Amino acid sequence: MATLSTHTLNGVDGTHAGGIGVTLVKLAEAGAELIFETETDAGGRLRREIPADQIDTAATYELVMDTAAYWATQAAAAPTAGHIRQIVLRFEMSDAEGAYHMPVILGPNTYSTWLSH
């Protein structure tokens, strides 16, 4: 079983970015497959276990974060035209038993992320 996690932080005011809609999609030759759809908790965290039989080590995955809806709730950085509406992180799960952690620091017009195993 693989573990996928993230921790989202609001780079404008330094708070945890809770309530961000998150989907995980597997992209393979047979087409796209939704693995899960959820949201970050109040602490900006998400941790999901994915059964090994749902992981294709040859596939590419997309972790999609709906940041437009999040920024619409933030008075300090209300979105306007040109704001980043989604963050899409494409990655591979080469180990069906691995741990994949992708923290994200986000702003209305920027984000920073990294992958740690």
Image (cartoon, rainbow, N blue to C red):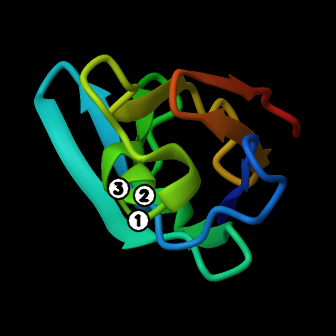
Callout 1 touching callout 2 (CB < 8 Å): yes
- What kind of residue is marked 3? Ala
Q: Are marks 3 and 1 in contact (CB under 8 Å)?
A: yes
Q: State which mark lies toward you, 1 or 2.
A: 1
Image-quadrant location for residue 92:
top right
Query: Where is residue 31 drawn, in percent x and y?
Result: 11, 29
Depicted 49 relative to depicted 42: above or below: above
Q: Which mark is residue 70?
A: 2
Q: Nearer the viewer, residue 48 or 28?
A: 48
Q: Which residue is mark 3?
A: 72
Amino acid type, callout 1: Thr
Taking the spot 52% from the left edge, 45% from the top edge, the residue there is: 77
With respect to residue 83, does 52 lie above or below? below
* Residue lying farthest to the left in this orientation: 31
Rendered-image quadrant of the C terminus: top right
Q: Is residue 51 left or right of residue 104?
A: left
Classify mark 1: residues with Cα within 10 Å, few (<14), some (14-19) or many (20+): few
The amino acid pointed to by label 2 is Tyr
Please report contact status of discs 3 and 2: CB closer than 8 Å, yes or no: yes
Please tell me whether mark 3 sits on a helix, a strand or a loop. Answer: helix
Q: Which residue is mark 1?
A: 73
Report the number of discs.
3
Tag 2 secondary structure: helix
**Can I make out residue 88 in this image?**
yes
| Image x and y of residue 101, in percent | 77, 47
At x 23%, y 53%, the residue is: 34
Question: Could you say where residue 61 lies in the image, as x and y percent from the top left?
Answer: 43, 33
Q: Measuring 79% from the left and 31% from the top, which residue is drawn there? A: 115
Numbered circle sitting on residue 59? none
In the shown orientation, is residue 5 left or right of residue 114?
Answer: left
- Kind of element beneath mark 1: loop
Spatial CA span between label 3 and label 2: 5 Å
